[in-house]
Image (spheres, rainbow, N blue to C red):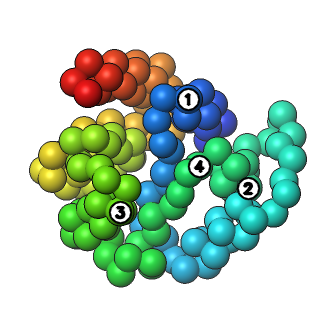
Amino acid sequence: MRVNADLFAVLRAMRTESMVVIATDNMDCFSRAFARARRSRHRRAPERDTLADWADICDDIICSSDVATLKADDPRTFFGTWLDQHGMRFADAVLIDDRADNCAAFVECGGTAIQWKLGTNHIGDATAALKQWLDASVTTR
């Protein structure tokens, strides 16, 4: 599976300041493929940005098939369980998502959301919003 190279580069750089977790409304085969990619000793090629590359830089995955709900349907279960397990609150997290309903549900729970869609939004907009959030979260700690 190919992934967005620009977003991949931004999140890889942000890993020095925060955890990076994939949150996806997806099937169990996606979750298994991600876990398999994390276990493999994969060497990233500069011209590729695949799910295996994402698995290398991500700290974890939250998949709807694993938590039995969709992001927008029950964000407290979808995100909250993982956040609780890691000693975090919604206010400690930012969601980058292409869907307005997912972003609204996350914000309603107290988180920050950046709606960003490949082909519609420029990666610089997402990067600036993410940096602004990181800067603000550092000053409130």
Mark 1: give few (<14), some (14-19) or many (20+) Cα within 10 Å: few
Residue 90, disc = none
Residue at (83, 36) in percent of width and height: 47
Q: Is residue 44 above or below residue 70?
A: above
Q: Is residue 73 above or below residue 135?
A: below
Mark 3 sits on what residue? 85
Q: Secondary structure at mark 2?
A: helix
Q: Earlier in the sequence, mark 1 or mark 2?
A: 1
Query: In front of the other: label 4 or label 2?
Result: 4
Give amino acid for label 2. Ala
Give amino acid for label 1. Thr
**Is residue 54 rendered to the left or right of residue 25?**
right
Mark 4 sits on what residue? 58
Query: In front of the other: label 1 or label 4?
Result: 1
Mark 1 sits on what residue? 16
Image quarter for residue 129?
top left
Residue at (28, 41) in percent of width and height: 92
**Is residue 45 rendered to the left or right of residue 28?**
right
Query: In front of the other: label 3 or label 4?
Result: 3
Mark 2 sits on what residue? 52
